[in-house]
Image (tube, grey):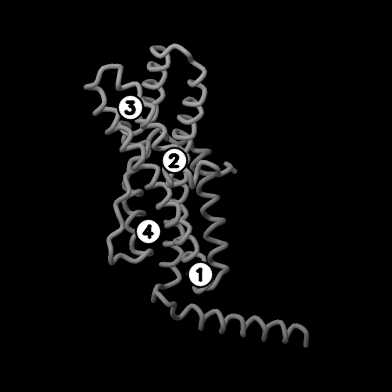
Amino acid sequence: STNLVGKFTQSVRRIVQDVKDEGTSSGQTKEEVIETNERLRGVRVRLDENYDTAKKALVTLMARYSESKSQRNVFTRYALLKAMIKDVIRLETQYWSLVEIPRQEKAETVPAFVLRACAIMEKTQKSGEGVKTSAKLAEEAADKRERIERLNDMTTIQIETENTQMTNDLYRLLKKYTGLRNLIRELKSDYVSSKVYPIFPRYTMLKDMIKDIMHDPDYMEVCHEVDP
């Protein structure tokens, strides 16, 4: 009889699962929500890398700026300021270092914007990856199998809920990343424009560029984050 109860419980579970899988709020099938989950996860990994690159560059800039204050010789410090800014704006010229994210349109919903950003990031050539070894490919395939197995054990609604959470997290990260990306772009523009000036007043201009970033809300929001 225990076996019978077990079988009955299983069949009820299956019916519940089938009912849940029949339709979702987005009208996507289970295969589609799994595919979306994989896309969001993959893009999150890429965006994390880009975000960390941008954040590290600016945090390092501030540290170097603070260190440079001990340099009493104006000409030496001027050279230091130029060098530290150049190291940051180099990320602008290496198109693969910092991926370009478009602005969110006024009428665009969060999920629509995130999926559009995903499509752009998926197209962006990832540098420095080189050819993957067969061991690396096998490891990635095994990881993917595990992820798909986990998702297959979930209902469509559960996966959708997870996707919604991932979308919201990705949206917040996109906003933070875009803020830092814009600061670096502005820094490059200001730095290039300042080249026409002699050392004075350019020396002061370079200091102001760095201080502007230091006090910018987009930088202040993230500079205290502790890296995991």
Q: Which mark is residue 187?
A: none
Look at label 4 and name its amino acid.
Val
- Mark 4 sits on what residue? 114
Q: Position of residue 133 (x, y in %)?
A: 48, 35
Query: In which quarter of the view is residue 203 placed?
Result: top left
- Mark 1 sits on what residue? 161
- Mark 2 sits on what residue? 215
Mark in the foreground, 1 or 3 = 3
Q: How many labels does the image show?
A: 4
Foreground residue among 26 and 65: 65
User: Mark 3 packing: few (<14 Cα in 10 Å), some, or many (20+)?
Assistant: some
Q: Where is residue 90 in the image (x, y as percent from the top left)?
A: 35, 28
> Which type of secondary structure does the marked residue at label 4 adopt?
helix
Residue lying at 40% horizontally and 22% vertically, measured from the top left: 81
Q: Residue 205 carries which label?
A: 3
Using the image, determine if residue 151 lies above or below residue 23: above
Look at label 1 and name its amino acid.
Thr
